[in-house]
Image (tube, helix red, strand yellow):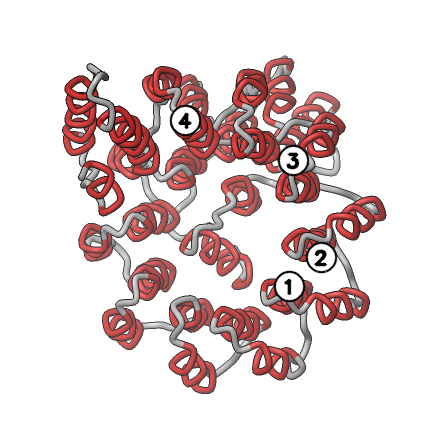
Amino acid sequence: MKPIRGNLCMQCLKGRDKFKIFVQVLYGKFDIAGFTTSYSSVAVPMRPRSMDEKGSYVFNQNLRITQLGKSGRIEEAIQVFSEMTQKNIVTYNSMISAYAKNGRIVNARQVFDKMPHRNLISWNSMIAGYLHNDMVEEAYGIFVNMPKRDIFSWTLMITCYTRNGELEKARELFNLLPDKQDPVCWNAMIAGYAKKGLFDDARKLFDEMPVKDLVSWNSMLAGYTQNGEIRSGLQLFEEMPERNVVSWNLMLDGFIEFHDLDSAWQFFKKIPDPNVVSWVTMLCGFARNGRIAEAEDLFKKMPNRNVVSWNAMIAAYVQDCQIKEAFRLFSQMPERDSVSWTTMINGYVRVGQLEEARKLLYQMPYRNIAAQTAMISGYVQHKRMDEACQIFNLMSTRDVVCWNTMIAGYAQCGRMAEAQFLFDQMINKNIVSWNTMISGYAQVHAFVSDDPAQPRIAELCSILKTLTAEMRNIDYMSDCKSSMDIL
């Protein structure tokens, strides 16, 4: 397949699809599988009417890999991929996205490296995978080696930097753009500034844009509403030459984040054509602020309920510790996804009903990292580390939250040898991992320092110094939490 020319992909995507991707990318809810599906839909031909049997088989299997990856069923996706006797470039791209979506970025890179042929989607999917897993340098390594780039390539890389707080590098890249007429990269840069609260820089760039589209206005609006600048957001909303339901939903969410439920409710009633996001946003607003009766009433009035609506109401009951009501609704659901199961397991963990949580975990039709981590967290809270370890050892895929939960559990129980063993095995450590270890050793040090008969004080001090030195060597600045623990 010939590479995509220039901005073809972004030009073909509809405005709402563009904004869906950018809201996900820029505000931390990026759906790598959804990105690849949207991106591929304009770059890969639709299924031909006269597709032969082999072509139909490959098409259907590719679709299965994408769906399994999105639902967290990565082992099943791997099995489908492995059993395919015929693969095409979409097969490999779908598998890269499935791995990346489920935290297995090393496997995603292995598939990428073994591809017999790559297209722009392959390269961009790999960058998107690194973005999804907060691996900026690796993303840049892919970016600089690309034989060709399109507007998605530039936008994803700019977003990698803005998400990581490296706005100067993002701006340097933005200034190198070969074509500054397309608003997409402008929108990414504006949203990056806005997300960091640099509204003057964001507004200056916004005013300099050669062409503003609805996404540009919504990006600026999202920056205001998601940073508590509700008055500035409302002023911009009034200035907008046109609005869509996304614009209304951003304002609605802004009022809710500002804890102004009454204004949010009045605003909700003015939305010309509220969609399911509008209803769920309002429902979650009531739920998060303890107004469960109003959330229930809204749920009953919803014209169309999808799985997200049901999950939101279950989460409302869980937050209010109404576990029986949550399970009643869970039992009535016409369909469930991984969020439904995980929310319900979290609910049982929250009220200490670990046996009920465990039963539900093993009833799940497929394993899910979030559900397993929730179960581990429950065992950790009750210092049942052996049972937590059993779940951990059975997991085929582990993310950084899962590792940190186990390490924290051992540290809280004073089992630092086991915590250190897991820490040493962990590939992608973050600041929480280091802080957990430092805090654990600091607590042990505080305990033994009160006992003059204990000979381990010098050893523990040495370990603490080594950990903090290693932390600085890999560019993690010792933060306030680390410093307090060391002191």
Where is residue 126 drawn, in percent x and y?
40, 33
Q: Along the line of sight, which residue is nearer the eye, 293 or 100?
A: 293
Q: Nearer the viewer, residue 382 or 22?
A: 382
Q: Which of the marked residues, 3 or 1, is nearer the chain's N terminus?
A: 3
Which of label 1 and label 4 is nearer to you?
4
- Residue sitting at 62 percent across and 29 percent down? 65
Residue under label 3, please give it: 67
Secondary structure under the numbered disc 4 in the rendered image: helix
- Image marks 3 and 1: residues in contact by CB distance under 8 Å: no
Q: Nearer the viewer, mark 3 or mark 4?
A: 4
Q: CA distance from mark 3 to mark 2?
A: 25 Å
Tags 2 and 1 in contact by the CB under 8 Å rule?
A: yes
Q: Nearer the viewer, mark 3 or mark 2?
A: 2
Q: Amino acid at mark 3?
A: Gln
Alpha carbon distance from label 1 to label 4: 32 Å
Q: Which residue is mark 2?
A: 313
First-in-chain label (2 vs 4):
2
Q: Amino acid at mark 4?
A: Ile
Sequence-wise first label, 2 or 1:
1
Tell me the residue that label 4 is attached to.
Answer: 407
Q: Is residue 47 visible?
A: no
Residue 287: which disc? 1
Figure check: 31 above or below 68: below
Nearer the camera: disc 2 or disc 4 = 4
Q: Quadrant of residue 146?
A: top left
